Amino acid sequence: MSSISLPSAPVAAHLPLPSEAAHTAAHTCLNCGHPVPDRFCGRCGQDAHHTHRLTMADMPHDVLHSIWHVDKGILYTLRTMIRRPGPTIREYLAGKRVDHFRPLALLFMITGLYALLSSVLHIQMLPPRDPTMPEAVWKMQQASTGFLMKYMSWCYVAMVPVWALFARWFLRRGGYNYAECLIIAAFVTAIINFFALLYLPVTYTYSDTPQIGMASVLFMLPVVAYSTWAYGSLLKHTTLSLARRLWCGFMTYMLGYIVCVLVIVITTYAINWSTFKEAMKQQMEQQRLQQARVGKPAAALLR
């Protein structure tokens, strides 16, 4: 009898583990397959020397390595932006970016941390209530300052395109386009919110005290000074005088700040319009009663 050979079962393709693949293709990027003559792939940027199979022994190193490199970029960017904002931004725009944390990521990270801490601390930016103040007026002030404290930092983020518009106009002698002005505004706004983050212990200490207004004014003074210097230093390479550069920096920040405050005020009144109307009604009623009390003694004297 002739033997009938049955077809052999298909053999599953063997997929090499990363350690095997690295051994067989030591000079090929495991991410995109591009030849890697050096440590990093020229096509996708992956590190070709750290693609071995992961083990538990690698976990502590990877965690510390990731935290260190993130913190290193943040701390370096914060330090250089505080000490020399103009040269730092100009270097970033010129292409020296590997040591810096990305400005938009820095802005969102700092703003998110500030918003989280301020909501947890429940900071009250109003002094204690005056006993003669109507209830509706007090509620209106609480609503407006509460909205301001809760969303001020995020309003700064939303106003970055507006600050960029003013920077495009006042810093036009520097030759910056609008996209570069967005980066400039993001860097400066991130540092302003970082200052606000550092100032939180002070505002928390004076929360709901008569000194809270003065504490807010003392915070704004260095913020305005830093913003004026930061924006103005971006014109250092021009022929403008120091006074003119500082004036351009001051106008860039202040006009953006005024627009930001107007947006917050309009939004607050729009959201709390019914409370605002009630507060105005009570305020007018209180003034009418006071005038009536003053008028009665005067009428008695005339008699």
Image: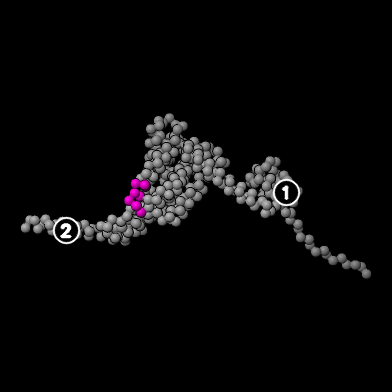
Disc 1 secondary structure class: helix
User: Residue 169 at what x, y percent from top left?
Assistant: 41, 39
* 221 horizontally vs 114: left or right: left
The residue identified by callout 2 is 293
Mark 2: few, some, or many residues within 10 Å (few <14, many ≥20)?
Answer: few
User: Residue 269 at what x, y percent from top left?
Assistant: 33, 56
Disc 2 secondary structure class: helix
Residue 196 seen in the current view: no
* 72 horizontally vs 144: left or right: right
Question: Which residue is depicted at the point 29% across and 60% down?
Answer: 135
Three-letter amino acid code at disc 2? Arg
Q: Disc 2 vs disc 1: which is toward the camera?
A: 2
User: Residue 176 at what x, y percent from top left?
Assistant: 47, 38
Q: Is residue 269 above or below residue 28?
A: below
State the separation of the CA atoms marked 2 and 1. Answer: 92 Å
Question: Which residue is depicted at the point 6% across and 58% down?
Answer: 303
As rendered, which of 157 and 35 lies closer to the eye?
Answer: 157
Three-letter amino acid code at disc 1? Ala
Q: Is residue 36 above or below residue 54?
A: above
The residue identified by callout 1 is 22
Question: Which residue is depicted at the point 35% across and 57% down?
Answer: 143
Q: Is residue 287 rendered magenta in the image?
A: no
Range covered by the magenta-colored residues = 208-216
